[in-house]
Image: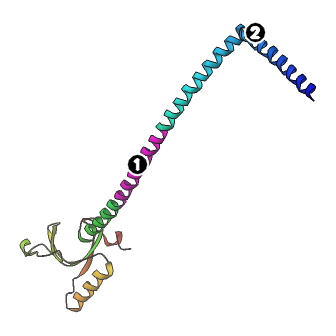
Amino acid sequence: MLKSILTTVCISLLFLTFSCKSAKDISQTPEYQAAQRDLVNCQNDVERLKTQLQETEATLNSKDQTKGQLQGKINQLQDQLATTQRNLDMVSQQVQETSDDYGVWFRVQIGAYEQNQIDQSLQTTDQFALEGGDELQKIVLGRFRQYDEAKRLKDHLKTKGLKDAWIVSYKDGERVPIEAVKN
């Protein structure tokens, strides 16, 4: 048993001696020295690339944060825009509902006079209007969005004895033929 241990130790010592000697001899060759320089250069490149990777990751994280902040601002602005659009739509609808300059209106005309015209200062509300044009003064009553409402006023005036009452129409502030808007 001792003999086998001794043999193993001797073989190991021989192996170490030859391997160290050959490693020493190899380290003296120009190829080995060039490979060593390449290894050092590669290690330096790896360290430089690791630093660049860390910097790039930091930049990306910063950009992701900025992107998130900008997306939040975009969402906030879109919400504000939607709210403003709804408010604008409501105001536009209110203006259109109350202004002769928007949409379709119907009125009941009860006369058109060339002579004996009524003084314009007697026009008191939008329910009683004096319109000029074609050298005639036209007297109109009411202001309705629905044709049927104007028709009810016209029919009521006729039952009260006013024979000359008819419906006239307006679109966006201009008087137009009733056929053009009666739908």
163 in magenta:
no
Where disc 1 sits, the SS reads: helix
68 in magenta:
yes
Where residue 28 is drawn, which disc sits there?
A: none
Nearest to the observer: residue 76 or residue 86: 76
Image quadrant assignment for residue 124: bottom left
Mark 2 lies on residue: 25
Counting the numbered discs, the total is 2
Going by the image, does 108 lie left or right of 79? left
In magenta, the rendered stretch is: 60-82
Residue density around tag 2, few if under 14, some if 14–19, many if 20 or more, within 10 Å = few
Cα–Cα gap, marks 1 and 2:
63 Å
Q: Tell me, yes or no, if residue 7 can be seen here.
A: yes
Image quadrant assignment for residue 148: bottom left
Going by the image, does 60 lie left or right of 129? right
Q: Residue at x 40, y 54 (%)?
A: 75
Q: Tell me, yes or no, if residue 175 can be seen here.
A: no
By secondary structure, the bulk of the magenta-drawn segment is best described as: helix
Where disc 2 sits, the SS reads: helix
Nearest to the observer: residue 144 or residue 15: 15
Q: Position of residue 112 (x, y in %)?
A: 17, 75
The vertical placement of 22 against 122, above or below, is above
Nearest to the observer: residue 48 or residue 15: 15
Mark earlier in primary sequence (1, 2): 2
Q: Position of residue 9 (x, y in %)?
A: 85, 23
Nearest to the observer: residue 4 or residue 151: 4
Q: Position of residue 48 (x, y in %)?
A: 54, 25
Q: Position of residue 76 (x, y in %)?
A: 37, 55
Q: Residue at x 47, y 44 (%)?
A: 64
Going by the image, does 55 lie left or right of 11? left
Image quadrant assignment for residue 83: bottom left
Mark 1 lies on residue: 69
